[in-house]
Amino acid sequence: MAKVDSKGRVVLPKELREELGITPGTEVEIREEDGRAVVEPEDAPDEVLERMERLVAEASAEREETAGIDEGVEPVARKHRDAIRRGAEKYGGSDAEGRDNG
């Protein structure tokens, strides 16, 4: 059984980390659900970028006029997209053009 230390940290058992794909540096979401703490790994930057690009493509297909990828994109959305791309490149996923770096 895991214990909470004086700083509130808990070490997840190795088997659980391996099963969930949690490696050093993996960001996790921790939330309360029905009186329990739930730890869930966040999606990898590559997966977030793919999902975001798929949503943009779907939204563009629904528009009468298809704009370029940066046309009509809110500055905040562009900033988040660029940050996700930088993260994907930094952590060895694919680069902005989808080339495999790992």
Image: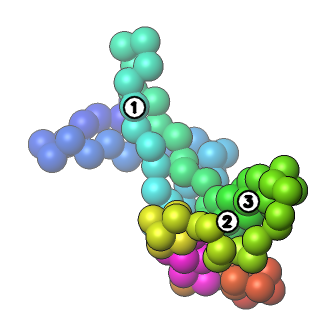
Asked whether disc 1 touches disc 2, contact meaning CB atoms under 8 Å apart, the reply is: no
Q: Earlier in the sequence, mark 2 or mark 3?
A: 2
Question: x, y percentage for residue 90?
Answer: 55, 83
Residue 58 visible at all: no
Q: Quadrant of the C terminus?
A: bottom right
Q: Is residue 6 above or below residue 83?
A: above
Residue depicted at 44% across the width and 43% down the height: 29
Q: Is residue 2 above or below residue 78?
A: above
Question: x, y percentage for residue 33?
Answer: 44, 19
Q: How far apart are labels 2 and 3 at the CA level?
A: 10 Å
Circle number at residue 49:
2
Dominant secondary structure (helix, strand or loop) of the stretch shown in magenta: helix
Residues in magenta, as a range: 81-89
Q: Nearer the viewer, residue 29 or 75?
A: 75
Q: Nearer the viewer, residue 24 or 34?
A: 34
- Report the residue that reaches farthest toward the front: 64
Question: x, y percentage for residue 68?
Answer: 75, 76
Residue depicted at 63% across the width and 46% down the height: 20
Asked whether disc 2 touches disc 3, contact meaning CB atoms under 8 Å apart, the reply is: no
Q: Which residue is mark 1?
A: 31
Give neighbour class at mark 2: few <14, some 14-19, many 20+ (Cα, 10 Å).
many
Q: How is the image coloured?
A: rainbow
Q: Earlier in the sequence, mark 1 or mark 2?
A: 1
Q: Amino acid at mark 3?
A: Val
Circle number at residue 56:
3
- Report the residue that reaches farthest toward the left: 6
Residue depicted at 32% across the width and 42% down the height: 10
Q: As drawn, is 60 to the left or to the right of 30?
A: right
SS of the residue under disc 1: strand
Q: Nearer the viewer, mark 1 or mark 2?
A: 2
SS of the residue under disc 2: helix
